[in-house]
């Protein structure tokens, strides 16, 4: 199976900050990379697919980039409602998730 | 819009079985497969596998073979996850999830989750 890693494992940022989360795959997944946001006690929310395609209804402050083995999720102008844990998932082969990045608001 | 509604929390003893249901609405049930994802307390997400809602063929991830069974009742648009010989480390929230489009494992629609607690 393809292993996914994320960094950092957690971060604390202020409202308005630009936040970047990195996701790496153990081998190429091309652009078969999805991002989710999860809040405590809730199901994950689908944010970005195909590495950079924003799901309908997701605010444009969220963006994704990358291909191959290195991907980033950027939140440009962090909002209070953006707290939660962010997961990447590769869908090139048998799906695997990254371990998550917890985002707190300072 | 697509909605997935799961059955309620379960408390089971070790060795027992549990069956979690996931009822879909809002689109053609057989157009997309149904995936299952596990989340142990305080842990991340694990993809368990999926079931083809057209053929009923299941595919299980490596860690979820043997005691885990996916099934369907297309007449009521419902997918099921059955876990047998429950152990304490099966304690988790189990989610059903549907791909956002055909031919992808990117999960666009999720049930609310079902907490299964295994305790004596």
Image: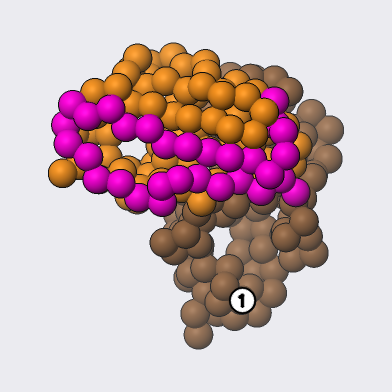
Question: What is the letter of the orange chain?
Answer: A
Q: Residue at x 33, y 26 (%)?
A: A75
* Extent of the magenta region: A1-30
Question: Which of the 4 image quarters holds residue A94?
Answer: top right
Question: Which of the 4 image quarters holds residue B8?
Answer: bottom left
In-front residue for pair B20/B36 = B36
- Residue B92 spot, x, y in % from top left: 50, 62
Residue assigned mark 1: B87
Question: What is the letter of the brown chain?
Answer: B
Specify the color scheme.
Answer: by chain
- Residue A80 spot, x, y in % from top left: 18, 34
B107 relative to A85, above or below: above
Question: Which of the 4 image quarters holds residue B67?
Answer: bottom right
Does the image show residue A10? yes
Q: Residue at x 55, y 77 (%)?
A: B88
Q: Which secondary structure lies at badge 1? A: loop
Q: Quadrant of the C terminus of chain A?
A: top left
- Residue B71 spot, x, y in % from top left: 73, 47
Whether residue A3 appears in magenta in the rendering, the answer is: yes
- Chain hosting mark 1: B
Q: Residue at x 70, y 31 (%)?
A: A29
């Amino acid at each position: 199976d393809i292993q996914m890693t994320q960094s950092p494992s957690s971060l604390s940022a202020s409202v308005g900050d630009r936040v970047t989360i990195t996701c790496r795959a153990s081998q190429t997944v091309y652009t078969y990379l999805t991002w989710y946001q999860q809040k405590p006690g809730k199901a994950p929310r689908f944010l970005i697919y195909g590495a950079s395609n924003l799901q309908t209804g997701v605010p444009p402050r969220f963006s994704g980039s990358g291909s191959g083995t290195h991907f980033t999720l950027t939140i440009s102008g962090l909002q209070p409602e953006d707290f939660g844990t962010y997961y990447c998932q590769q869908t090139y082969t048998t799906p695997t998730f990254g371990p998550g990045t917890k985002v707190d608001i300072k | 819009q697509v909605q997935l509604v799961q059955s309620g929390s379960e408390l089971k003893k070790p060795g027992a079985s549990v069956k979690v249901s996931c009822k879909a609405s809002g689109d053609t049930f057989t157009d997309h497969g149904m995936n299952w994802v596990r989340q142990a307390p305080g842990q991340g997400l694990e993809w368990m596998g999926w079931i083809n809602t057209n053929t009923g063929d299941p595919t299980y991830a490596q860690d979820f073979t043997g005691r885990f069974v996916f099934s369907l009742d297309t007449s009521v648009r419902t997918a099921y996850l059955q876990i047998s010989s429950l152990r304490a480390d099966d304690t988790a929230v189990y989610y059903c999830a549907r791909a956002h489009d055909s031919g992808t494992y990117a999960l666009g629609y999720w049930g609310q989750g079902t907490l299964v607690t295994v305790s004596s």
